[in-house]
Amino acid sequence: MANENSQAPIPREVPCGGLRIGDVAPDFAARSTTGEIRLSEFRGRWLILFSHPADFTPVCTTEFVALAQSANEFEKRDCALMALSVDSLFSHFAWLRLIRDRYDVEVRFPIVEDPTLVIGRAYGMVAPQDNDSATVRTTFFIDPQGVIRALTCYPANVGRSTPEMLRMLDALQAVDDGPVLAPANWRPGEALLSQPDASLETVFSAKGQTDWFMKETRGGSKK
Ligand code: BEZ
């Protein structure tokens, strides 16, 4: 399908299907580049679980180089990374070796193999009746209790932004103690917003026009 104003075909891909913010992330056990792992073993830490379409592809390679280069930033935030694709464990190994040799960076976070797509389907990373088994670029931000707190879905032809992933994680952690809100473009150290008080008294007694619903606060942040 093509947009009438654009030259490039618009890829028809899955929505971030199946799971929603607030759902418990489905548990699974699988082989990975760091050994046998179980998702529930990551409880107690934040976890970013993300899928990529395929090993040995250009955009995915740039994502893995960027994430591996920022691994200490995720570590500082007590957040583990876990990647997943349909490719075999030995494909993952060969790709990581190539990334190490070519880009001088070692990907040390686990990459899960999902040859039967049982995990990809549970997470809505692939369309239910799609002939193409590639997982799209879904990213699940999972809190220390194992609950999905945010999810994003990028098409195969656009790579994710590591700074935005870190910003999302910072914002989720900052509002975690509640009841505070992270405004647009919020960065650690900047003011958060208070949860508006839903009472007519507050609305009519507020001095400024927006004071009853727009109030900055420094509270709630762990940072
Ligand atoms: C890539 O990572 O470059 C890619 C993966 C699948 C389809 C298109 C591009």
Image: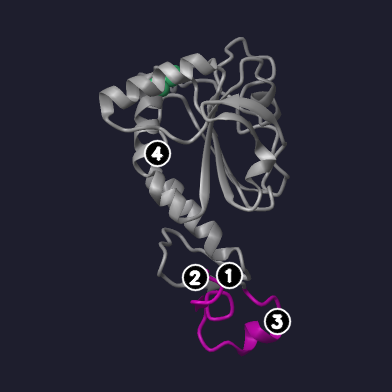
**Residue at image coords 70%, 31%:** 28
- Estimate the x, y position of residue 220 in percent, counting from the top left: 56, 72
Q: Earlier in the sequence, mark 2 or mark 3?
A: 2
Dot 4 alpha-carbon crowd within 10 angstroms: few under 14, some 14 to 19, many 20 or more: many
What is the magenta range?
Answer: 196-222
Dot 2 alpha-carbon crowd within 10 angstroms: few under 14, some 14 to 19, many 20 or more: many
The verdict on residue 18 being magenta is no
Q: Check contact, mark 2 vs mark 1: CB within 8 A.
A: yes
- Estimate the x, y position of residue 110 in percent, counting from the top left: 52, 32
Q: Earlier in the sequence, mark 4 or mark 3?
A: 4
Residue where numbered disc 3 is placed: 200
Q: Earlier in the sequence, mark 4 or mark 1?
A: 4
Element type at mark 4: helix
Q: Check contact, mark 4 vs mark 1: CB within 8 A.
A: no
Residue where numbered disc 2 is placed: 192
Q: Check contact, mark 3 vs mark 1: CB within 8 A.
A: no
Residue where numbered disc 4 is placed: 67
Q: Amino acid at mark 3?
A: Leu
* 8, above or below 215, in the image: above
**Residue at image coords 65%, 19%:** 117
Q: Amino acid at mark 4?
A: Leu
Task: Name the foreground residue: 4 vs 99.
Answer: 99
**Residue at image coords 69%, 19%:** 128
Given this view, does label 2 or label 3 mark the residue nearer the observer?
2
